[in-house]
Amino acid sequence: MANVFAFVESRGTDIRKVGFEAVTAARMLADKSGGEVHALIIGPPGISGKANQLGQYGAEVVIVVEHAALANYNPEAVTATAAERIKSGGYRAAIFSTSAQGRDLAPRVAARLGVSVVTDVVSFEVEGDTVVVRHPMNIGKVIATIAISVTPAVLAMRPNVISPAKNAKAGRVENAQPAIDPSTSRVTVTETRQGGAGKLDLAEAPVVIAGGRGLKAAENFKLVEDLASAFGNAAVGATRAVTDDGWRPHSDQIGQTGRLVSPDLYIAVGISGAVQHLAGMRTSKTIVAVNKDKDAPIFKVADYGIVGDVFEVIPALTAAVIEAKKHH
Amino acid sequence: MEISAVKIAVCVKRVADMDVRFRIGADNLSLDQAGLKFDINDFDAWAVEAALQLKEKHEGSEVTVISLGPDVVQETIRKALSMGADRGIQLKVDTVPFDGLAIAKALAEELKVGTYDLIFFGKMSPDSSNGVVGPMAAEILGLPCVTAISSLEIANGKGTAKRELEGAQEIVEFPLPAVLTVDEGLNTARYPSLKGIMAAKKKPLEVKAAQLPEPQLKVRKLELPAERKAGRIVGEGAAAVAELVTLLQTEAKVL
């Protein structure tokens, strides 16, 4: 009876990294209370080919809903399908992701089930029938410990806090139908426009290089792009000042009103470190700052700082990273 | 083609300015309010702006601003009225709980009697940082919902919006009535004019008692996060790059 449900996010026929993280989190929760993990994956024909991977991450059962009309995210059909499965499965907890899609889906599903939801969960414990979660508030300046005493406990994990971990279970595949005909949804995603091919997302990249006003002009973001390419596993972000000026799209903004990132390595290039920016990156594992002003607040959160002109330091760093990668 | 008037509701929240060092109250469950400054949530201000832009396009439209909370939320409602909204409703409760479902239920009770064509929310508020009230209210009301929109067009009883995803965008179509939650990038909120501030004082602001259901989430403890351990300045200029790279390889082990 203590089984745990995981919603596995996908785009097209690809499972997203947060999908594996959700299964890993569900496995951890199920192991704390003794129970199975049942993972639900929904997508267009071809998605079932990916389902067998989920057993590797700890799912006993993988429910696959494949439908030609589900090439794009269909909020109403996915909500209905997930809610119906959670209800009929009698799960003690349901794990979602705090991604753009998860932020849309988890509250809809929870409301459909008549239960609350906590998003942006960074850790959890099980105390009898209660799931106790930690959730950053006030732009990460306060951490709340919240008890979810209702069943099922619905929580959405913050990306990148739990690494997908292999823990092979049976992964028995069950094929299922959407709970409503996707073509009857009132809200329809008519198109999903992909960003640059193969471009790493800010929330998923192990390395994030972010640029601020210190770069002086939009075209100088090339320095940041070059450093990102030198790493090979880096995504490029920006401060609000920069996105407000139109140097970069709003979707690149890291901060209070933008994206939350916590990569292994964060390099701040010409960023002073306004509170609103720090809110989006202060949980990064290692922070490097390059700024010409030695009193810039960014140096207070940086593990390593270089005081200097970004136009000299960043090209030198790019060359050094290329060199270091060669010998690795 | 002439487009008819739209009846719009915008749900707004009064939130503390985040640019401070928060202190935890003696009960470990609340924040010390001393010295905090409050204003309308940024995302909600963009929601008000979106509503006002539609009102300006569609003659005869009306914008109602709704806020749940104690009497101090009247300031927040007045701010939206001074931007140009037509009337306000305070749903009076002593405190606003963390539980988004409880908030959504209380708001939905009011929203369902308003027969609105569009209901706007900010996509989240920075204080509770949970971001669930809009879609939960939509679900309770049984209305179509699009979350975190960064563009919006309304024509002939239908809407088209854009949502930012990780490394992609979705184009979404929906019928009216609908619930929309607003992301940054949709617009820039206007500042209230002096004339607007004067006019807002005379606009209707209705106070209604609201019912909050029993919360299902219980905040057990608030605490400040562990401070990052002090970092260091490796050096100055390009000459410091070699040492930085060594530290990233040997100490931080990220390269």
Image (cartoon, coloured by chain):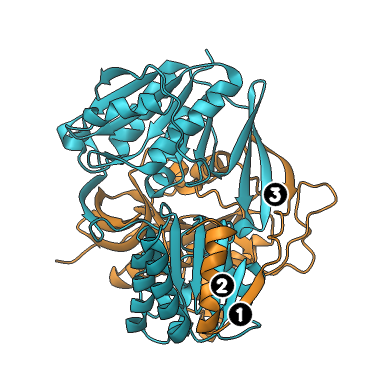
Chain colours: A cyan, B orange
> At 24% from the left edge and 22% from the top edge, which residue is drawn?
A177
> At 40% from the left edge and 32% from the top edge, which residue is drawn?
A7
Residue closer to the observer: B120 or A221: A221
Give amino acid for label 2: Glu
Give amino acid for label 1: Gly
SS category of the residue bearing label 1: strand
Give amino acid for label 3: Thr
SS category of the residue bearing label 3: loop
Which of the numbered marks, if any, corresponds to residue B95? 3
Please tell me whether residue B141 is drawn above or below residue B193 in the rendered image: above
Marks 2 and 1 belong to one chain = yes
Q: Position of residue A120 (x, y in %)?
A: 53, 46
Marks 2 and 3 belong to one chain = yes
Q: Which residue is mark 1?
A: B235
Query: Could you tell me if the residues under marks 2 and 1 are in contact, i.e. CB atoms within 8 Å?
Result: yes
> At 42% from the left edge and 65% from the top edge, which residue is drawn?
A324
Q: Position of residue B236 (x, y in %)?
A: 58, 84
